Amino acid sequence: MSEQILLQGKILGTEEFLVAGHAEGRSARSAGEDLLAGRSQWITLLCEVLPRALLAELGLARILLGSSGGGQFLVVLPGEARSAAESFLTAAARQVAELSAGDSRRQMALESEKMDFTHADAAPALELDQIVWKTVKGPASAMPIMRRTLPGEARPGGGDDDDP
């Protein structure tokens, strides 16, 4: 009997994808409900199509699909299909990434991953503020100009940086 592989696939980033963003010009509740429903459907379809496409690409029977849904799937593969499955899934991941490449939140997440959060105030404050603002208010929103004073610098209206 040949070696068999139980492949568990998980679509990463589904939680962030489900709760991110808003729709312009609509009530927050209505827009939020529609976005959640639409994005949930997209994840469901991706979890249904991806393992079936994998099996079809490898010329394997559909009965080898164990389950799919909830952002993940299970398939049984013959051992000799491992490298072909890895190549297919790598290409699929690249294509899904290309679909979301225009999403500025993805770029902002990549930028914030490069920041140093191991020490207090090590991350660039203005860049981090902009990332947080645009993540919460939407990528097209303009962050208000903030007045900042450096430690030891006099504040407008008197006092220094440690006065209430």
Image: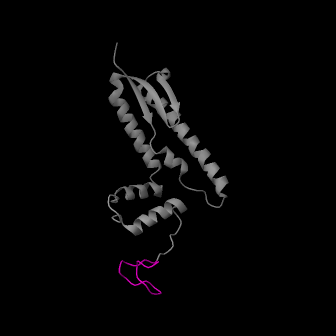
Give the quadrant of residue 10: top left
Q: Is residue 120 above or below residue 19?
A: below
Q: Which residue is drawn at 51% across and 27% down?
A: 67
Place of residue 120 in the rendered image (x, y in percent of width and height, measured from the top left): 35, 63
Is 130 or 121 nearer to us in this picture? 121
Type of secondary structure dominating the magenta stretch: loop
Q: Does the magenta stretch include residue 86?
A: no
Quadrant location of the N terminus? top left
Q: Which residue is drawn at 40% across and 84% down?
A: 154
Q: Give the range drawn in magenta.
A: 147-164
Tell me how many marks there are. Answer: 0
Q: Is residue 157 magenta?
A: yes
Q: Which residue is drawn at 38% across and 59% down?
A: 111
Place of residue 143 in the rendered image (x, y in percent of width and height, measured from the top left): 50, 70
Is 59 or 51 nearer to us in this picture? 51
Q: Residue furthest top?
A: 1
Is 131 or 61 nearer to us in this picture? 131
Place of residue 134 in the rendered image (x, y in percent of width and height, measured from the top left): 50, 63
Q: Which residue is drawn at 46% across and 78% down?
A: 147
Place of residue 24 in the rendered image (x, y in percent of width and height, measured from the top left): 61, 60
Say left or right for 24 vs 14. right
Colour scheme in the image?
one colour
Say left or right for 29 vs 90. right
Q: Is residue 120 above or below residue 2?
A: below
Q: In this view, does 82 lie above or below 45?
A: above
